[in-house]
Image (tube, helix red, strand yellow):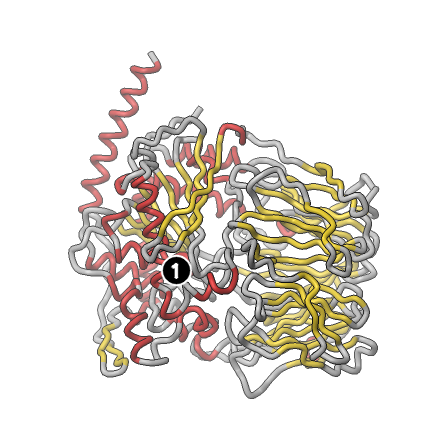
Amino acid sequence: MKAKLFVVIFASLLFTFSCMQKRTAELKYPIARQMDTVDTYFGHKVADPYRWLEDDNSTETKNWVEGENKLTFNYLSKIPFRKKLHERISLLWNYPKFGVPFQKGGRLFYFENSGLQNQSVLYMQQSITDTIAKVLLDPNKLSKDGTVALTGLGISKNGKYLAYSVARGGSDWNEIFVMEIANRKLLDDHIKWVKFSGISWYGNGFFYSSYDIPKKGDELSQQNRFHKVYYHQLGTLQKDDRLIFHNEHFPLRNYYAYTTRDEKYLIVSESESTSGNALYAAQLTDKKQFSFVKLAEGFKYDYSVVGHLGKQLLVLTNKEAPFYKLISIDFDNPQQQKDLLAEKETDKEVLQAVDLVGGKIFAQYLKDASSRGYFYDLRGKFLGELSLPGIGTLGGFNGEPTNNTSFYSFTSFTDPGTIYKLDIATEKTAVYRKPSLKFNPADYETKQVFYTSKDSTKVPMFITYKKGLKRDGNNPTLLYAYGGFNISLSPGFSVSRMAFLEQGGIYAMANLRGGGEYGEDWHLAGTKMHKQNVFDDFIAAAHYLINEKFSSSNKLAIMGGSNGGLLIGACMTQQPQLFKVAIPMVGVMDMLRYQKFTIGWAWASDYGRSDDSEKMFNYLYAYSPLHNIHQGVVYPATLSLTADHDDRVVPAHTFKFMATLQEKASHKRPALVRIETKAGHGAGKPTSKQIDEATDIYSFIMFQLGMTPQFE
């Protein structure tokens, strides 16, 4: 009886698929007006007919957005299993989630989400041994529609005050509020126009970074200029905040300030791109005096202070150490430096983070894109290794230098994050909190492979799937990657991805050049005139999955976001026949003009600029997704995602790319764009919107790959 029912369902789905394929050819995309706009680069004329879509506030653009969303959601609504998939993702999502606890002023703080809350709630215990937890801040009450998100916080050293930042509608612009912890009373302090900033306490006030208020009518290229560090004293107005650090000669530099945990030093990092920085420090003996010492010159190498031993500042850096090392710099004599934890170049382990807890140094390393943890004494002598349950990623390791107890998390592709409690003296760990799940992680396995890219470089890739998988070349597969800005991808959990895996899907994550998985040299090998290496690595990953019969071109979907959205745009235009489905999310698609919008200028360290030289222009023009869409080509079925309030990668990138794709591509496969409203680049998106978005993405992927999901 069940077999007969399955045949009926399968036949019904085939009929639906056939009907929707016919509708794809008949899709009526919103009319997009073409302009005669032409730019000239070193004598080369480049048309930009959809320049008007760069103005996301115009009535014409808003009408186009409305039309695109109407078309997209109408198409998605006809996918027969979309509703059931939404129910399944919601069910999988509905489990308690815990953040890594941290201690401040003798109290214990942690985030918890009961399951489907839009944002996690901040709880507090009076001590680490206390069993009673009270809600300190519930971000879900910050707005009725969930569009105000908690983006950061800082707790004063004495545990008396909580300062927290929020963003509205997904914007990068933040506001800071202050609460008195004892009675949860909100103070009058209110800081606006904060961006790319932390909240670092010193006494009864804190340091933050901000820009001047944007002037009405300013173009996007005129915003995000002259970043400044301020000190705010509680009980005063923002206009009276003290300017601590800025440079009026360099409008495009950023300044990030933070204090050491004991508030004895103020550190300022100065940067002019996404990699490399200068470093300054000041002793905080009197908040009226800030005499800065330059610890490190910019902007070739990365430097960050992780703590101090007396006047020896401990600095994590990649100077003369592509895999990073920990050095000490004498505050009184910055030229006096010595290695504390030497670079692990021979072992190819990248030093990612260092914490001083309980009189020991704990170092987190990345080995072949998976976490390792080691203990050292304060002189850098090796003491032991943290035992981990398998391939995965460490998180947190929160604790004060004088604490005897610390907490950390471990996650993998099938483990959403178990919290562990660590006794520093004995280095023994115990499970502190483990989530209860609605699937069995033991049913799945992850393997790591090393495939060969176009230039013979070996590239690692993780592949996760249900045990017992048959490698017959017919498995629906999702390939994901990023490949940029020295960002490393390591094993991580996704609830919505589990809904794909349990239906027989394969998830593959490739660790491309451009990332930080093997240090700075690996990063540089995927930047500027070497950016094509990133795309070649990704294309080679697809060929590996096909050649090893995990999948086939007709069963392969690709996905990536931001710089990863650029990756998907470039690969789908370079090798359209290799992929069946493409999901570029908030991607950088116009490589000739990206630097003209908001913070785009900071990405030039990875990309180069079209106005740098004719050689750089030609290189960018050759792979820019927007400029490499050709008439009549059958591109992968595309669902592109962006948000109307994305002020990092502005939606114009996606708007122009999709208008061009809809104009030129063969209409054999759909080219749809999903535009989230009252949302930004992705951070702080409420759970309800995340579930809706995931449902649409996986519905589209599964339907286009011909999957027939079965739900209990």
Q: Quadrant of the N terminus?
A: top left
Residue 290, image x, y percentages:
75, 81
Looking at this view, is 367 or 282 the one in front? 367
Q: Residue at x 50, y 28 (%)?
A: 443
**Percent x, y of residue 256:** 63, 71
Towards the viewer: 454 or 660: 454
Q: Secondary structure at mark 1?
A: loop
Pinpoint residue 47: horizontal percent, then vertical percent: 23, 73
Could you say which quadrant of the image residue 192 lies in?
bottom right
The part of the image, by quadrant, that contains residue 704 is top left
Question: 361 left or right of 38?
Answer: right
Q: Which residue is mark 1?
A: 587
Q: Is residue 303 above or below residue 387?
A: below
Q: Residue furthest top?
A: 1
Toward the bottom, the furthest residue is 249
Would residue 562 be seen by someone viewing this image from the given angle? no
Q: Amino acid at mark 1?
A: Gly
- State the residue in front, 617 or 581: 617
Is residue 41 shown left or right of residue 500? left
Image x and y of residue 423, in percent: 78, 44
230 vs 636, nearest the viewer: 636
Q: Residue furthest left?
A: 632
Rendered view: 677 above or below 450? below
